[in-house]
Image (tube, rainbow, N blue to C red):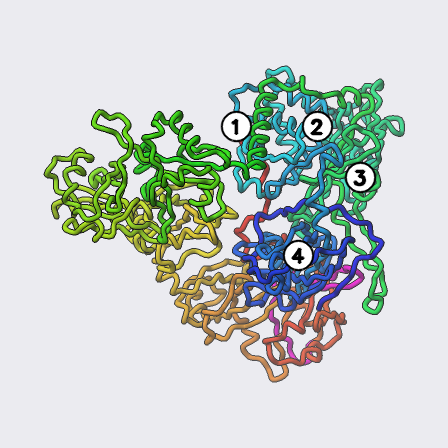
Amino acid sequence: MTIMTPAPTDQEEEEMLVPRSDLVFEGPQPMEETGNDVEKQPPEDPQTSRFTWKIENFSRLNVKKLYSDPFVVGGYKWRILIFPKGNNVDYLSMYLDVADSANLPYGWSRYAQFNLSIVNQIHNKYSIRKETQHQFNARESDWGFTSFMPLGELYDPNKGYLVDDTCVVDAEVTVRKIVDYWSYDSKKETGFVGLKNQGATCYMNSLLQTLYHIPYFRKAVYHMPTTENDMPSASIPLALQSLFYKLQYSDNSIATKELTKSFGWDTYDSFLQHDVQELNRVLCEKLEEKMKGTVVEGTIQQLFEGHHMNYIECISVDYKSTRKESFYDLQLDVKGCADVYASFDKYVEVERLEGDNKYHAEQYGLQDAKKGVLFMDFPPVLQLQLKRFEYDFSRDTMVKINDRYEFPLQLDLDRENGKYLSPEADGSVRNLYTLHSVLVHSGGVHGGHYYAFIRPTLSDQWYKFDDERVTKEDVKRALEEQYGGEEELPQTNPGFNNTPFKFTKYSNAYMLVYIRESDKEKIMCNVDEKDIAEHVRARLKREQEEKEQKKKEKAEAHLYTIIKVSRDEDLRQQIGKDIYFDLVDYDKVRSFRIQKQTLFSIFKEEVAKEFGVPVQSQRFWLWAKRQNHTYRPNRPLTHLEEAQTVGQLREVSNKVQNAELKLFLEVELGLDLRHITPPDKTKDDIMLFFKIYDPEKEELRYAGRLFVKGTSNPTEILNKLNEMAGYAPDQEIELYEEIKFEPIVLCEPIDKKFAFRTNQLEDGDIVCYQKSLSSESLQKLRYPDVPSFLEYVQNRQVVHFRSLEKLKEDDFCLELSKINTYDEVVERVAQRLGLDDPSKIRLTPHNCYSQQPKPQPIKYRGVDTLGDMLVHYNQTSDILYYEVLDIPLPELQGLKTLKVAFHHAIKDEVVTYTIRLPKQSTVGDVINDLKTKVEFSKPDAELRLLEVFYHKIYKIFPTSEKIENINDQYWTLRAEEIPEEEKNLGPNDRLIHVYHFTKETAQNQMQIQNFGEPFLLVIYEGETLAQVKVRIQKKLQVPDEEFAKWKFAFLSLGRPEYLEDSDILSNRFQRKDVYGAWEQYLGLEHPDNAPKRIHAAYQNRPTYEKPVKIYN
């Protein structure tokens, strides 16, 4: 079912977010480009619609990905794309997709801001919502969240995301004009610049902007001692100085990579979203540590440190215990508090210690007492962390509190005669604060987006700092709209639902920064260039000049040609070290930036100055890319070409519009080693390049080049080649032509008896040669000839192997070949581990994006080569994970592994067994295997296997059923003894399902929540509920007092009908078949007091967030 709710026309337009998401990557591969016309831009006013998608039988979906029906927003077709079992991750993956991308014209593009939600059908406030924005085009026609929410949370029946096996997805899409974002200049509009998002660093950006706009803090950072030899990427103080300087003086948004590198973070850390509060504490602690012993020591304490006193005071005797503690920020309750003052009231609330909770006072024994907290002093800069995230014990999960919570522009902490202050507090200090900044979190407990509203000068003008974008805002936007709570949208389709649509505001204040009025002048001090160390200014000025120079060069690029000149010296330096194939890497040769109108003859004079080669001794060769993708000198420049301008020559040499001209400079020396004019080249002359290979040292080097006659034989130059190599004149040598190296190496022997032309050699060809080897030597050497060595070089790969138990640590490295077979790779790994049987090694590939192992290991001989193991989409990894199995992998793959929970008939215990059997085995075989492992209540007991899901029994497996298709990933398999009472059922007796349940009301609807262990029970003909209750209490061993509170109901399709003790149960349950009987069951209604457990399939998978760490 789909529901469309267009947004109201008078809704205030939201500011656009910078394109980013809290996930690292886009969704599936983008669509192909088609057509020729550019699609029209979206309309001027943003158009918003909501779309709801109900997915039934969700847990039984057997597809990798699933699309919703298309819906239209802003005149465009959209749809939602989900991966129910994750897009190669243990998370639900969800994206917004352009529904008609395959049919759109060439060059189409559209911009949308959107949020996606998984609705919690029991408590709407626990719904998971994430928002982002993106410019969609043919290459990126879908965008969203690969790690939307953990599958364990989604599939856990206690969580409320699947009710009656139905998942509800909600989307809100706003289509905007692209020009709004791309043409906006933050510096020009506001005087401030933003910070670039590295992937999921919006939480850090909002905190950095807040700290930067506390001038006293900024000044202290500038005064931290650093030296000109420090590198920003290795020094937190210098990186922060550099960042703050750029925020103060730059015209464009600033990158934070230097700072995160100084934290010791890698790219993966930058794609993990953390908590602002945690980062604030860790960063301030690190800065406090770095400031010790410097002129700014103690700044963090002076700005942010306050003190409170914990006290316990006896009521009947004169005894009081106190303890003074410091704080850098205060954690204020949001839940149950209307505003900041209510939170402070709760903070200092007095707790009475009496009855069983009396206080043990020294000398006086147990006494009634008062316990509480009072403040001794508040800091000049007061940081209030609002407890928007709390642990919900009843639901066993973290939840976000989106309740309405107000905070004032001016905060008076001396109110009501200083009710928050200790009697020892300094009464001369006026604790009146003004609001400086509001940090906002938009989204749910699993992620979202952070941004900040700041008053940099404490004037009436607020600014919103949202990653790269800074905008002017009014006080209503910064305060009232960040209180949270609920908002009502009028329903535009009265026929569907006449009640107004209420939705929770997921964007709300998360951290508040107040500045004390009496310290305002000191804190909001002037900070200018003289506060910044000279070497920092010089470094940043140099960086800026280099940036400007590059910008200028880019702007003037059309006026210049880059000429790159390679020489024999470059070939000698690079071949065998930097490169092995072809002749030269042009990125490492001398380049000249020459105006296009310059005559080539003038350029030759510059070359003469640079290389010391007279103009008349220079001969330049043009390079050409051959059909086999090699790049070789092709022909010398003609006299006519040398008379042209540099620009004309580039156009002749390079049909592709490229600003570079690549030349080889041929220089000839006379007998006295002086430069001579190169002799004229005839049609029969061929310039060949030579490389020498030493198979014993496994080394290749450049020997030089020679002109040969095309009609002559290679035998005529053997003496010269021996001389170039330093061999004896009569040394036998083998010659090979290096033909190509992509996609495979092609290096073939040259027949010395035939002429060079007959051997198809031409200008620029490469000849590799080596000493002729005896057959004995050939067998001893790893790579005895040039072709085998070049193939080795082309395919060699150092692989970092990691144990699956230590994902971040390299265990060992092996140099392998990309063309090594599966067997060769596991054999080398087994050798390294000292393992006799390589088939017990199982390898898992690496995900280059998440920096984690892929979910599925490599099957036995499931890939052909090492190269196949290392490829991840369009990237190549150098990491593989290994594990050592207890049985050979082929044998394991032939087996089906099932986890079966055995419920003992008498003891209150559950033991999980791992059963491995051949895939063709039956359930009967599983039961027979279990019989050898479990402890029975009696020797002749019989077992059965059940399928349990959502705390309901869905199936009793026939013993003849094959186990190959049984899925224990999301369904629990339960084994139990068959009770004696079930073996002799009368014709009118019934075997019924009995489930535990609670009732919860959400959105004015009653919801049934099952929990605990379901079971089967025999009810006899004519048996009353009272009689059945006796048997149930005995079976479950529930105490009388507790059992008396339980209610009993007949449930059919989720609707309870409460029963009286006198009711005859067999009259209610008419169905004889057990399969499908989960639709009707006897319900036991009582509170769920059992400790919550993660769904069986996810028990060993961590779902917590990584802590923030600054390593340096």
Residue 250 locus on image (x, y percent): 66, 30
- Circle nearer the viewer, 2 or 1: 1
Mark 2–mark 1 Cα distance, whole angstroms, equals 29 Å
Magenta stretch encompasses residue 1013 = yes
Return the residue at label 2.
Answer: 327
Q: Residue at x 65, y 47 (%)?
A: 19
Provide the secondary structure element on which disc 2 rests.
Answer: strand
The residue stretch that appears in magenta: 997-1023
Q: Find out whether the residues at labels 2 and 1 contact each other: C-beta distance under 8 Å.
A: no
Residue indicated by mark 4: 159
Left or right, 382 with respect to 224, comes to: right
Instruction: Pick the residue in front: 875 or 964.
Output: 875
The CA span between labels 4 and 2 is 36 Å
Give left or right: position of 945 versus 11: left
Badge 4 or badge 3: first in the primary sequence: 4
The kind of residue tagged 3 is Glu
Report, in whole angstroms, how far the alpha carbon at label 4 lies from the one at label 3: 38 Å
Q: Residues within 10 Å of mark 3 (few under 14, many from 20)?
A: some
Labels 4 and 1: the sequence-earlier one: 4
- The dot on residue 473 is 3
Which secondary structure is most common in the magenta stretch?
A: strand
Whether residue 1112 is visible:
yes
Amino acid under disc 2? Phe
Q: CA distance from mark 3 to mark 1?
A: 37 Å
- Name the amino acid type tagged 4: Lys
Q: Earlier in the sequence, mark 2 or mark 3?
A: 2
